[in-house]
Image (spheres, grey):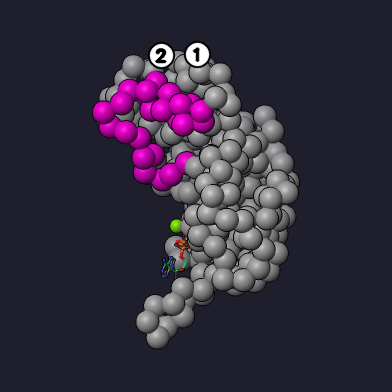
Amino acid sequence: MITLDHVSKHFQMGAVTVTALQDVSLQINKGEFVVILGPSGSGKTTLLNMLSALDTPSSGKICINGIDITSASRTDHFKFRRETIGFIFQAFNLFPSLTALENVQFAVDMRGNHHPKNGAAQQVLTQVGLGERVRHFPHELSGGEQQRVAIARALAMGNPVLLADEPTGELDFRTGIQILQLLEEQALNGKTVLVVTHNREISRVADRVIELSSGQIVRDGLPQGGKAAISDLHW
Ligand code: ADP
Ligand code: MG
């Protein structure tokens, strides 16, 4: 479970203070599929950076699976990221000289001895629908396939929380929706999944939409008009 308690984040830019998050409190349960929706500059990335302990709040407290990450040490943060968080980026961030399999294997190796090595990378790639593409290099894969490799890499870490920052930003709408469905499946399998997007239409497939505006939560609940099926979306 993820709990934010009155979290604010300010950046000092010379004489100007930029407030990226203002008094954000929320609770996200295990297995939830949450979309964080908001326009550019509304604080979405700042929120994900706080949740992955890549940055610390100016005030307030964040607990993830019982760990208070706001009072933890840098060493604890490192361990926390390695064991709790799987991060998926807008630009995929694959190693261009490694095959799909090697990109995933790299993550499995990073996980050390906690995870069985043999076949794990192949298995997660099959799970995301790329079983036949494992020997391809990133440039030989479509954008949607590259994002699947990135998801497989996050899954291979075996961590309970998946954070995805605009994972569909580089993809056409239809491919983006398929990626969202894949992420939703992970939530159905018990992972906690948070997806950031600025695209309201895409947010309609979520179980829960947390909407940010100028660093504040302005709405939290079911998508407007209820949760939509993929066939209901417009592109
Ligand atoms: P989003 O991801 O929703 O586009 P961000 O979280 O990146 O929004 O940014 C929220 C606000 O905080 C913006 O006004 C942005 O300019 C500011 N901001 C984010 N990171 C920094 C930083 N490292 N230094 C100064 N200002 C920042
Ligand atoms: Mg952002």
Ligand 2 resides in the quarter of the picture at bottom left
Q: How crowded is mark 1: few (under 14 residues within 10 Å), some or many (20 or more)?
A: few
Closer to the eye: label 2 or 1:
1
Q: Give the range drawn in magenta.
A: 88-112
Q: Position of residue 9 (x, y in %)?
A: 54, 70
Label ID, residue 220: none
Q: Where is residue 212 in the image (x, y as percent from the top left)?
A: 58, 63
Q: Position of residue 190 (x, y in %)?
A: 69, 33
Sequence order check: which comes first, mark 2 or mark 1? Answer: 1
Secondary structure of the residue carrying tag 2 is loop
Q: Work out whether residue 92 or residue 102 is closer to the camera in this orientation and state it.
A: 102
Q: Is residue 87 above or below residue 145?
A: below
Q: Can residue 38 be seen in this view?
A: no
Residue 149 among magenta residues: no
Q: Residues within 10 Å of mark 2 (few under 14, many from 20)?
A: few
Residue 109 among magenta residues: yes
Residue highlighted by disc 1? 118
Do the CB atoms of the residues marked 2 and 1 lie less than 8 Å apart? no
| Quadrant in the picture for residue 213 | bottom right
Residue highlighted by disc 2? 132
Which residue is depicted at the point 67% across and 29% down?
A: 189
Which residue is depicted at the point 38% across and 17% down?
A: 133
What's the residue type where badge 1 is placed?
Asn
Left or right: 104 in relation to 231: left
Left or right: 202 in relation to 92: right
